[in-house]
Amino acid sequence: MNRQIAGWIAHRWAKWVTLGVALVFIIGMAMLGFKLTSVQQNDIAAWLPGDAESTKVINKSTAFSDPDSAPAVVLYVRDSGITPADLAKAKADAEAFKDVKLVGDDVVGPIPSKDGKALQVIPTIKMGDDGWDKLPDAVEDIRDVADKNTGGLDVKIAGPAALGADQAKAFEGIDGILLASAVGVVIILLLLTYRSPVLWLIPLICGVASVLTAQGVVYVLAKGFGLTVNGQSAAILSILTLGAGIDYALLLVARYREELRHYQDHHEAMAHALHRAGPAIIASGATVIIGLLCLIFAQMNSTSSLGPVTAAGIVVALLMMMVLLPALLVIFGRWVFWPFIPHFGDPERNESGIWGRVGRRIAKKPRFVWIVTALVLGAFSLGVFQLDANGLTNEDSFTKTQPSITADKELAKHYDGGAGSPVAVITKADHADAVKTAFASVKGIDPASVEVKGDAKGVAYLEGTLTSSPDSTTAFDTVDRVRDAVHKVPGADALVGGNTAINKDVQEASSADNKLIIPIVLIAVFIILALLLRALAAPLILLVTVVLSFGAALGIGALVFKHVFDFAGADSSFPLFAFVFLVALGIDYNIFLMTRVREESLQNGTRRGALIGLGATGGVITSAGLVLAGTFAVLGSIPVVFLAELGFVVAVGVLLDTIIVRSVLVTALNLDIGRHIWWPSQLAKKDDVEIAQPGDDAVYAKVDA
């Protein structure tokens, strides 16, 4: 960071201006952030790429069906057989459902099952543009009607509306509950890190302010610029912004504490801390931001929008920790470190602390250390072969059994598996009969269910019922066969959609995104590291270590998911999300370490610089890793398998990065390779410094390497 800018941020009177402006900005953005849920788009169609066939069906079928509507299937079951009284109740309920808010007259049924043991009534809930959050209340209103005077009937609610209600409940209050849980974890870790009754409050206040401000910024982007936000990206935004923000705070406070021993004036100490640590922190944040923005190349709207959403959070976190945090620290002065106040002239403990001792132990046999460490991480990576990332069924996507899933299972016992979730076909109206014939002939479709539901502006809309569960691989195969059949009708321009087709297109787009985005992220991160470290060897080595760490974390996660948590698999987009977060965040810590190593190498040579750098940054980077791992682990509190898996793998990966990869593997490589790690820069030609006697902590000798 420019010395003059750093001086102004820590200036005696500028700090008060900074505080005032920051408070106005934070309050204004926080007020907007409270509206973030109102702009979320949680319907699955909003996640799809625009060129997906199922998306085209949605866009073309608005004249026949409202994309902001969802049918609920009210199922009445009597194992001994439906009675006339049961039928009368179902008919009465069908009329009563019309009076339920958001339902209206769009009610179908009662429809008896072939086995005579069930009836179904299908009211359609009209959610509106922002009605996803209204689904739970609407489904409960329907349930209240259906549960009256059952006379022994077993009543359940299935279908897309019930599933959507369960999904909405899973994310209900996510901003408050998730943030509160994450804040609790951060408080504990900050208290353990600083062992001060006061200091922890300042980073925490800045961290929470970062989250509230980021939510406001994302609201503005969604409202004014059409950025897609959903419950999933909103959850990740809060966690990532808080965790990364606290990380940057820890790194700056650590350097500030160090500089307080060198300068009597704490304003001057902060200016030097910003000048020294600022560039590394900004570079670390920029790496994360650019890595996240690589997601915009994804086909999936939900994935491509996650990049700008989370990148906005990192930008805000950087701004808060580089401007507001320094201002608050210099306002309060040295005493906030009580009872461990750093005084001017206190000795440095970089090489006498625990990480300094670890470094000297590694220095005895660095090549042996990095080879063994790499082999162990590689062994853990083999667990990846246990990962089944081919998508999850509706049932498997929750960590707890949901009412809609139980209802769908019961529905499948008495009706065709796809009841309530039909396959939809759009075609030219003058080819409707030919398309209907082709549609009805497909194996896996009930031929009696295929019918033309509407005809408008030369376009016909058809529906057919699947004979298998709509989220099964069998149903996906049926969609493929339907597409093959109707596409062959000459001149019909037929398109196949519906919920099953949407889910299938989501999985295919996610798989394609994995192959596209991962190489882009690697290339982008390599370029950033090369520019920052002014070398090619070090960036390549660092990138390999982080990818190895990612593989180990994913392998451990796959084993735990299958053999401990008993998850059925993983979402098809999970590997990409885990990769982007772990590579970006893993490089984050390596940047802070290696920029300090480079700084020390300029004066002391690479090998000595590696030990000093590890000793100086080891404690704070480990603390930062614990904070970020703890905040991501909180995602496991949401009953959604994708978020639980993501939180676990990112937490494990961050811990591997901070404790094993950064402190052991990278340090051992620095010590073994020495000055050549800076190739082809001038620093690669600088005389190195080695420990003359590895067992002697005090003796160092300068040698020509």
Image (cartoon, helix red, strand yellow):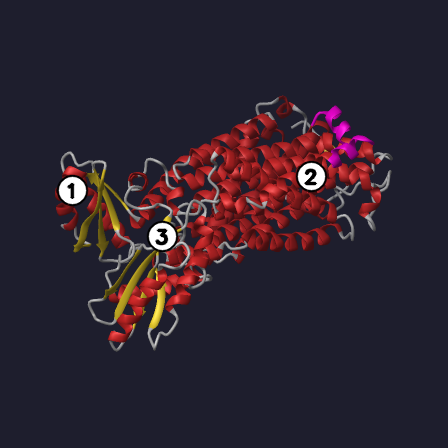
Q: Earlier in the sequence, mark 2 or mark 3?
A: 3
Q: CA distance from mark 1 to mark 3?
A: 25 Å
Q: Point out the image quarter for the C terminus.
A: top right
How far from the left and from the top, in percent, is residue 370? 56, 43
Which residue is disc 2 drawn over?
Answer: 611
Q: Residue 684 falls in which quadrant of the image? A: top right
Q: CA distance from mark 1 to mark 2?
A: 75 Å
Which residue is disc 1 drawn over?
Answer: 432
Which residue is disc 3 drawn over?
Answer: 70
Q: Camera-side residue: 116 or 330? A: 116
Q: Earlier in the sequence, mark 1 or mark 3?
A: 3
Q: Residue at x 75, y 36 (%)?
A: 20
Residue 663 shows up from this direction: no
Region in magenta: 1-20
Q: CA distance from mark 2 to mark 3?
A: 61 Å
How far from the left and from the top, in percent, is residue 127? 41, 50
How far from the left and from the top, in percent, is residue 293? 50, 34
From the viewer's perspective, tell me whether residue 453 is left or right of residue 689.
Answer: left
Dominant SS type (magenta): helix
Callout 2 amino acid: Leu
Residue 687 shows up from this direction: yes
**Residue lying farthest to the top in this orientation:** 682
Callout 1 amino acid: Ala
Q: Residue at x 76, y 48 (%)?
A: 199
